[in-house]
Amino acid sequence: MNRLSYQLLKAADPIAYAALIWLTWRFLAGELHWRLAIGAVVLSGGWLVTTLVRMNHLFKSYFDVLSRLEFSIPWWLGVGLAGFAIFRTHHAPVRIVAAAELLAWALLLVLCRRNCKRYVRQGHGPLPAGCWVSPPAEVLRPGDLILTSGLVAATLRETVGHGETVIRTRTGEMESLSSYMDRGAVLHPVAEFTSAVRRHGHYVVLRLRDAPGEEQVQRAGQIAREMLAENARWRTRVNERRRRIIGRLPLPAGRKAALARRVESSGYDWMGLFMGRLAPHRWTCIGACLELYRRLGVRTNAYGTGLLGFGTTLLDPIMPVRFLSDPAFRLVRLDDREDSGAVPLGPSARP
């Protein structure tokens, strides 16, 4: 799909939903001069068509809470409106259309229930059935994307909410790159990180479909170190500027010191947590992973393009769970336990 087609499709979704929400609200508030039964049938049909068009995507991305809501909310609205139309009118054609819509909604519910069987609940959300939950660190490879549970996942009612990318160091050990709210960009041993996650939650692993070559693996390590240095320089520069500004304020020295500590930046991109932007030199956890893949030349889905698909980033944060449906990756499954090509972790690994 070319960029223009993607933007048009991305823009069509919110426009269609906004129009239907507006019409439904006005209808329920009695502000539309439609005959009630006919209006209910028209709106139920509109929600039905919109859901049918999106059905394939919604079922494939069922692990995303927004996709589940995009099915359940229109379903309840559509069924309610069609049922209202049947009991509101005595005109046979309107009743027939409403009954057909009810039948279509029922079939969609059956398909949804069948689709649910392809997933299992893990933590606060569903995961594809057969995925390998919390595989040992020894099976991880350079380029793997680790998605973990945690506070963000619990808040959003999703199964994963944090991301880290595996890289191999020049000494042959495996580390993971990410960005933390209190520390900014970090590199730490994969074995220690995965062990800590297993004690409190779970993680899954996404593997690049096009395995990185040795040159890419080495370049990933170099890029990760460059990103850490960039983040540290940005953090130092910003914190020095903030301290200078605070130093000019007419406050006691103790208040100035306390204020400087309060506004000190860790190097984390807080705005990126709520918007889908990729800022230079600072990132969210998944933003750091995506930036690494971008610099490596790995093509992923377009993220953070905004509601209308034109790069606004507004109300379009980069959610780690959405990488489960990214065609650049495949989920590491239970079948991969027999994969004899797994890369060992190196001298510092612990079982």
Image: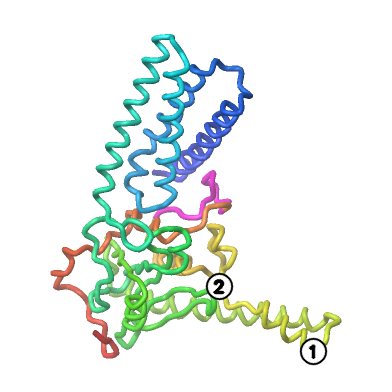
| Residue type highlighted by circle 1 | Ala
Q: Residues within 10 Å of mark 2 (few under 14, many from 20)?
A: many
Callout 1–callout 2 Cβ contact below 8 Å: no
* Residue 253 percent location from the top left of the image: 79, 89
Vertical side of 45 occupied by 238: above or below: below
Nearest the camera: 265 or 236?
265
Q: How many marks do you count on the picture? A: 2
Report the quarter where the N terminus lies: top left
- Secondary structure at numbered mark 1: helix
Q: Tell me if residue 230 can be seen.
A: no
Q: Residues within 10 Å of mark 1 (few under 14, many from 20)?
A: few
Vertical side of 174 occupied by 348: above or below: below
Q: Tell me if residue 252 can be seen.
A: yes
* Residue 19 percent location from the top left of the image: 55, 32
Residue displayed at 43% across by 75% down: 223
Q: Which residues are magenta?
A: 301-313
Please, what is the dominant secondary structure of the magenta stretch?
Answer: loop
| Residue type highlighted by circle 2 | Tyr
For disc 2, the marked residue is: 268
Asked if residue 136 is among those painted magenta in the image, a careful observer would answer: no
